[in-house]
Image (cartoon, rainbow, N blue to C red):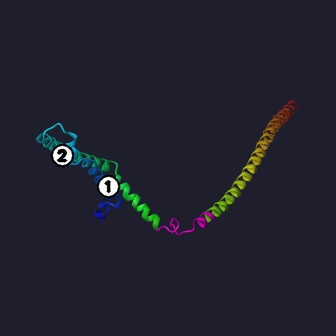
């Protein structure tokens, strides 16, 4: 199973091949004849040594660029990303809703209708919630009024107690004086 996951996908392999082909064509664009024409004042032996040096530099440069490409390719996880893209493209081609053969208008219309129905349902829920909120506010106001009315009653009860105590004290005082 791990071997399958480590096998690069076609997009990854195509990118690497394209890079190597492009690099090779850039670095080998100068033929031996064109190189010698670039240095007409040098002797044939000097041109030969210079050409060998040029080939060594190009070969080294080619290897360095390929190594740098591989390093960047691994660091950025470009291979994994390309494999994921390839997998998504394959899934896209297999999905009947996303397939080129499906009727996009029908799908869009169906989704639009479903969204309208959901919107109506949500608006109904919102209206019910607002209605409940208004009822709760009215109930809260009623309870606040009752509390204020009750605090007046508490003062009345206290006043009545005081009068009863005064009355009882007055009655006891009369009985004692008799």
Write down the quadrant of residue 104 in the picture.
bottom right
Dot 2: element? helix
Callout 1 secondary element: helix
- 141 or 48: nearer the eye? 48
| Magenta highlight on residue 57 | no
Residue 74: mark? none
Q: Dot 2 corresponds to which residue?
A: 55
What residue is disc 1 on?
Answer: 18
Label 2, residues with CA under 10 Å away: few <14, some 14-19, many ≥20: some
Which region shows up in magenta?
Answer: 94-109
Report the side of 119 relative to 45 (left or right).
right
Residue 174, position in %: x, y?
87, 32
Q: Are marks 2 and 1 in contact (CB under 8 Å)?
A: no
Name the residue: 21% across, 42% down.
37
Specify whether residue 96 is in view: yes
Q: Position of residue 130 (x, y in %)?
A: 72, 51
State which tag comes first along the sequence, 2 or 1.
Answer: 1
* Res 57 visible: no
Residue shown at 73% from the left, 53% from the top: 132
Pick the front one: 35 or 162: 35
Quadrant in which the C terminus is drawn:
top right
91 up-or-down from 30: above or below = below
Residue at left offset 39%, top offset 58%: 84
Q: Is residue 101 magenta?
A: yes
């Amino acid at each position: 199973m791990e071997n399958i996951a480590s096998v690069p996908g076609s997009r990854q392999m195509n990118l690497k091949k394209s890079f190597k082909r492009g690099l090779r064509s850039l670095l080998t664009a100068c033929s031996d004849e064109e190189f010698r024409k670039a240095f007409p004042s040098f002797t044939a032996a000097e041109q030969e040594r210079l050409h060998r040096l040029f080939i060594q530099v190009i070969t080294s440069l080619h290897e360095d660029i390929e190594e740098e490409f591989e390093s960047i390719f691994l660091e950025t996880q470009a291979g994994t990303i390309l494999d994921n893209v390839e997998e998504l493209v394959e899934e896209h081609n297999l999905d009947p809703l996303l397939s080129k053969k499906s009727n996009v208008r029908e799908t869009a219309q169906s989704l639009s209708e479903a969204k309208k129905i959901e919107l109506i349902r949500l608006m109904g829920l919102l209206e019910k919630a607002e209605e409940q909120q208004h009822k709760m506010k009215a109930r809260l106001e009623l309870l606040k009024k009752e509390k204020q009315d009750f605090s007046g009653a508490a003062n009345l009860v206290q006043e009545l107690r005081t009068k009863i105590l005064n009355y009882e004290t007055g009655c006891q005082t009369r009985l004692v004086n008799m």
